[in-house]
Image: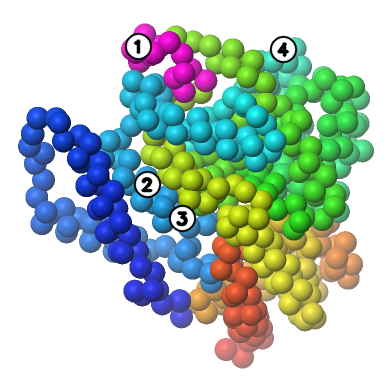
Amino acid sequence: MSPEPGPDLRWSEELSILATALRELETSFGGCPPFEIAWEAGPLQQQLVALAREMADNDPYFHPLYAGQMLKPPHPVARMAWTLSLFINPNNHALDGGRATSRLEKSCIQALGRLIGWTDPLGHLTGGGTVANLEALWVGRERRPGRPTIVASQEAHYTHRRMAGVLGVPFVPIPVDSRGRMNLAELDCVLAREEVGTVVATVGTTGWGAVDPVDEIVLRRAEHGFRLHADAAYGGYFSLVPEHLDPSTRRAYGALSVCDSIVIDPHKHGLQPYGSGAVLFRDREDARIYAHDSPYTYYTAAGGHLGEISLECSRPGAAAAALWSTLNLLPLDSGGTFAQFLGESCVAARDLADRLAGDPKWTILNPPELDILVFSARAGSARELSRFNRRIFEEARRGGLYLALFEAPAGRLQAVLPELEMDRPSVSVLRSCLMKPEHRGWCGEIVSRLETAWRGALENRTGTR
Ligand SMILES: Cc1ncc(COP(=O)(O)O)c(C=O)c1O
């Protein structure tokens, strides 16, 4: 059984709002001489209905019973703003191709900068966290000639190692502590033996939602002279809700303002459609690494083209239109509606953890630092437990609850389940990113469906079904 979205979703109602705004846009360009754009409504409609049928082959990512991977529905204003801007289809590479949306993008970067206490950062939007991190690592390599090595925790996003390969520089993974944060003693060993150019601190790891001790890493920068890059693709927005963070996590967030660069993905927690990442640099001097000329595109204005400070050439003005509209409607104010949404996610993760912790069937593998909860059933060995968790995952899906699976290193489980026989180097466990503010009100339903899934998995294992 899957949740039954129906008219409650009110998606089609968005169209009347969009139509009003489109009429305004049409009026603005009413001075252009009329010309024919040939399209016929019939085939177009048929094609779109065919697409809607194709799109049904997705899990209901927008629903609170989707509590799996990092998928958060865009805010309606972001959806509509993105769509509206496509009628102009601006390109934020150069002012000449996207004057208005370039201006909006610059204002978005300033808003993201203020979130971490920067007054005039350099930066721009990107297609996502991977490209944003690549740019920060590339600038880091260029600004630390002769010190190419990049280090990041073993739990950092897999693309850091890959991007080090793209940049042709060594990558050293640093083991993590029992909470999944970069182990500082291990970092010190590497700093003592290698000329490290960039340390990547992850602020919200993809698997566990753990926050590296940015404040402690900063203390090592003066002695070792590395650049400090914060990959806050997932966790950046939680700067707004220090009251929901434990003291050590809060200290890490407090040190973001002294990092050299930061990545924050609006398409993760910022209510944006995919195709919305951001990279920011504290020192505007970093712009010189991007210096180049483009004889075809930069012609009407001296400076100010976003292409002059980004690695990619063409980029969608639509991303800026959507983010700017969202930031206007839901500003990044502490105590504001957006901040309350984030707080609800933290509360939901803790609520779910508490409910499961009270039941001996379940083990909590990470007291959630942000809004990601990793948990597991119990069984005798790593192999059996992996199989059992996978069955729960499947049964839950059948029951309309969508979770994610995660391969957790066996060592991490041994700390919590010392009796577990380690006949496998990792264990498949269950993971939930409780990213929607609505999740809080659905924790009871999630637990009840988990119970059913657990029983179904047990019957399946013992062959009673
Ligand atoms: C911490 C972190 N960094 C980087 C990325 C990569 O971002 P993207 O998928 O937007 O390229 C992710 C994606 O989940 C992430 O969680």
* Residue range corresponding to the magenta coloring: 294-309
| Lower sequence index among marks 3 and 4 | 3
The colour scheme is: rainbow
Which residue type carries mark 1? Answer: Tyr
Q: Is residue 267 left or right of residue 231?
A: left
- Between the residue at mark 2 and the residue at mark 3, the CA separation in whole angstroms equals 10 Å
CB within 8 Å, label 3 to label 1: no
Q: Name which residue type carries label 4.
A: Pro
The Cα–Cα distance between marks 4 and 1, rounded to whole angstroms, is 33 Å
Q: Which residue is mark 3?
A: 75
Of callouts 2 and 1, the N-terminal one:
2
Q: Nearer the viewer, mark 4 or mark 2?
A: 2
Residue indicated by mark 1: 299
Q: Pick whichever of labels 4 and 2 is earlier in the sequence.
A: 2
- Classify mark 2: helix, strand or loop: helix
Other residues around mark 3 within 10 Å, as few (<14) / some (14–19) / many (≥20): some
Give the answer, above or below, for where 58 lies relative to 180: below
User: Dot 4 corresponds to which residue?
Assistant: 145
The answer to which image quadrant residue 264 occupies is top right
Tell me residue 194's x, y (percent).
84, 22
Of the two numbered discs 4 and 1 in the rendering, the one whose residue sits closer to the viewer: 1
Q: Where residue 2 appears, x then y in whole percent? A: 45, 76
Q: Which residue is mark 2?
A: 81
Residue 419 or 234: which is nearer the viewer?
234
- Quarter of the image for the C terminus: give it: bottom right
Residue that appears at 22% across and 47% down:
23
Left or right position of 341 against 16: right
Say what amino acid the circle numbered 3 marks. Answer: His
- Neighbours of disc 4 within 10 Å: few (<14), some (14-19), many (20+): few
